[in-house]
Image (cartoon, rainbow, N blue to C red):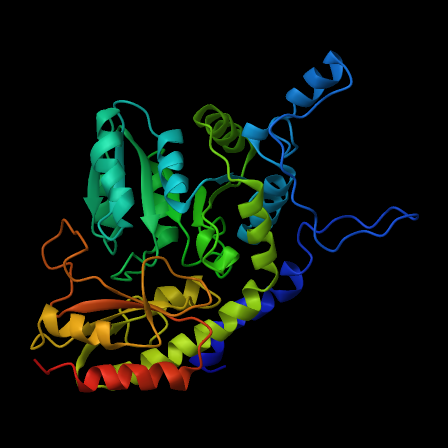
Amino acid sequence: MSEEDRVAAGWERLNSLLVRLSRPDVSDPDHGTPVNAPVSRASTLLFPDLAAMSRVGRRRYEHEPIYGAMGSANQHDLERAIAIIEGGTDTQIVSSGLAACTTALLVWTAAGDHCLIPDSCYGPTRRFADTMLKRFGVETTYYDPVLSEEALHGLIRPNTSVVFTESPGSHTFEMQDLPMIAHVAHEHGAKVLLDNTWGCGITAPFALGVDVSIQALTKYPAGHSDAILGAITVANEPDWHRLRDAAIQLGQLAGPDDCWLTLRGLRTMGVRLARQARTAYRVAQWLQGREEVARVLHPAMPDHPGHAIWSRDFTGAGPLFSVELNARFDRAAMERLVNGLTRFGIGASWGGYESLVLPTTGGVVRSREGALPVGPTFRLAIGLDDAADLIGDLERGLEVLGRG
């Protein structure tokens, strides 16, 4: 199998599963059943008597509607679907991908704890750790995402409760050795949390030793840039009870319309992402051959430093990667390139059907010296556009790169 085929293979294997997840049960012989469950909008649910209300109220761990603030029928359908995709036992849907990161950190840390977070983490996760988590009495150390086993042992303290991971890393795409990290963390009694947004659907986090898998469902599952929500998935009942109780206390949920849109998006996720992954790989290969480009930061490329880990841990690749220009170009030149593109929208987020570009030079924070690219860098999110059209657009942009 070629590398180009391999980046799409994991997505294609999901198709038969995705078209069946959380579909309504066809069991009423006298009435037809809709293919998609209807949107269920409700704040208050009524019960025939107090005993029934009390009985249902005790089932808060069972993904059943109890009260609107604890989730709708659509949310619970989506939770069951994501748990299956991730290979976990239970999922809690929350209001955004960032809420998934922050809620998980709140659940598995307490005042006086120490937390390890990779230096390559999603920027808003870092801001949360440096502000609110710090005010709650949790200390954070930012570690080299590609550190050795010996180095990780040296960073863990007696009060380290969480080792947070993100593989690949935001913007700089470092691949983390999750089985090694999980082995060391568990030896010291710490939980391993993974921001699995890039790998949702193409890696098995719990088989790699992760305890908690976090996703921004805004990206691949919703897929149409019209819904904001996140998910936290766990693999055992004690962790599920701890997570579910905390989510209820924090008021974390997603609206039924966003959940319904995401369930609809799931049906085509495998088809969409297989196409997008192939196109991204072709664009990355083309860019790698341009003299204006210093590096293409894409884990599926054979020369990527983390390619062996990607090959071991992933069944496919995402459509998101970064491009570092040669250092002879300055930031202003890179911005001229970005502003001149016509097939790429300028905007945050990724994983939708549209292609996006986002400059990262000047907007990414790292604690470690030398962790950021030397040349000006931008991120590409490849959508459903034809590869030739995107390459043509980038070629025109690169040709005017050096003009004043």
* Horizontal side of residue 265 vs 22, given as left or right: left
Of 49 and 226, nearer the camera is 226
Residue 329 percent location from the top left of the image: 9, 76
Of 185 and 261, nearer the camera is 261
In the image, residue 156 sits, relative to residue 3, either above or below, namely above
* Horizontal side of residue 216 vs 269, given as left or right: left
Total number of numbered discs in the rendering: 0
Q: Is residue 90 visible?
A: no
In the image, residue 223 sits, relative to residue 61, either above or below, namely below
Q: Point out the image quarter for the C terminus.
A: bottom left
In the image, residue 1 sits, relative to residue 83, either above or below, namely below
Of 11 and 267, nearer the camera is 267
Q: Residue at x 21, y 52 (%)?
A: 144
Residue 227 percent location from the top left of the image: 48, 51
In the image, residue 377 sits, relative to residue 169, either above or below, namely below
Please tell me in which quadrant of the rendered image residue 400 appears: bottom left
- Residue at the extreme right of the image, as rendered: 30
Residue 323 percent location from the top left of the image: 24, 72
Q: Residue at x 49, y 79 (%)?
A: 5
Q: Is residue 379 visible?
A: yes
Q: Residue at x 23, y 81 (%)?
A: 397
Q: Residue at x 61, y 26 (%)?
A: 67
* Horizontal side of residue 77 vs 112, given as left or right: right
